[in-house]
Image (cartoon, grey):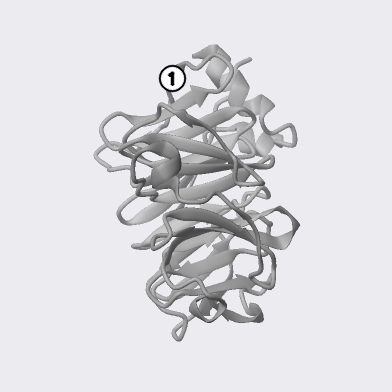
């Protein structure tokens, strides 16, 4: 366990002393989803309202995206420049540091992507889509022009996948299918392997580690070097149900039913 806690600190060398305490910050609210960026900011979604909070729980900004459609994904790949995606409306937008739409809302069906159900950001202001009709992953540029395509994954893998989330990290795309595991692809769409993490309801890739939330077992971490899975010492408040989990800069971020809790990871001295 000491080695695991040490890892959580070595992942984030910019951790300040104030963030290594066990001080707890609460952001009250019944949020539908949340994410964080590498600066430690929290992007919290409540209905069609997206709010931005700092590590002290102070609200910076809020914006209502009423005409956008129900948001399925918030991706803060670029700090203070989050992407939002609505599968039902087939719409995607990148926001600026005021949470306003930057460059207009992109209609995916008009660009030939009629059944995109998952999306995430990529390097060079690109995006990844999972096209349910074509059963393929497609990487596109900022003008939605395809630059890479996996081809039909059911033919490649011998089975159909049902992704629930995607994340790019250090030029690798990680695709979570709770029934199959986490599939890994390079930037050209070449399949690399499937990591045997099943039942994950959310995940986060950090420095050759995958932190994930298992509905039955709680927070766990997978080491991509040793292939070992260990439990995470997440300080979930007593009686609370953990709905989502992230870590940034030596802090735990926990989404609960009625609030978001930010708590420092205790240092080992």
Residue under the image location 40 percent in, 32 percent down:
235
Nearest the viewer among 239 and 217 is 217
Quadrant of residue 140 in the image?
bottom right
| Residue 29 percent across, percent down from the top left | 37, 63
Along the horizontal axis of the image, is 247 left or right of 245? right
Compared with 44, 137 (above or below) is above
Disc 1 target residue: 229
Quadrant of residue 141 in the image?
bottom right
Along the horizontal axis of the image, is 78 left or right of 239? right
Res. 179 in view = yes
Compared with 214, 154 (above or below) is below
Along the horizontal axis of the image, is 202 left or right of 75? left
Residue under the image location 66 percent in, 38 percent down:
18
Quadrant of residue 229 in the image?
top left
Residue under the image location 40 percent in, 29 percent down:
197
| Residue 78 percent across, percent down from the top left | 68, 57
């Amino acid at each position: 366990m000491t080695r695991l806690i040490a890892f959580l600190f070595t992942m984030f060398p910019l951790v300040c002393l104030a963030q290594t305490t066990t001080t707890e910050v609460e952001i009250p609210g019944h949020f539908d989803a949340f994410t964080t960026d590498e600066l430690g900011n929290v992007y919290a979604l409540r209905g069609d309202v997206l709010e931005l909070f700092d590590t002290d729980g102070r609200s910076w900004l809020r914006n209502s995206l009423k005409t956008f459609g129900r948001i399925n994904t918030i991706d803060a790949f670029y700090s203070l420049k989050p992407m939002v995606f609505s599968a039902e409306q087939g719409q995607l937008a990148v926001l600026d540091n005021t949470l306003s739409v930057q460059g207009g809302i992109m209609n995916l069906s008009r660009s030939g992507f009629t059944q995109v159900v998952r999306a995430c950001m990529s390097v060079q202001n690109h995006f990844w889509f999972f096209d349910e009709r074509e059963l393929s992953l497609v990487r596109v540029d900022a003008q939605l022009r395809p630059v890479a395509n996996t081809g039909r994954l059911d033919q490649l893998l011998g089975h159909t996948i049902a992704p629930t989330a995607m994340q790019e990290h250090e030029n690798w795309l990680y695709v979570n299918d709770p029934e199959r595991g986490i599939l890994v692809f390079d930037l050209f769409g070449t399949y690399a392997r499937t990591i045997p993490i099943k039942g994950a309801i959310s995940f986060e890739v950090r420095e050759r580690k995958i932190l994930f939330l298992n509905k039955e077992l709680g927070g766990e971490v997978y080491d991509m070097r040793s292939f070992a899975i260990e439990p995470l010492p997440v300080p979930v408040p007593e009686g609370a149900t953990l709905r989502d989990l992230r870590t940034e800069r030596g802090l735990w971020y926990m989404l609960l039913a009625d609030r978001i809790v930010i708590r420092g990871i205790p240092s080992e001295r």
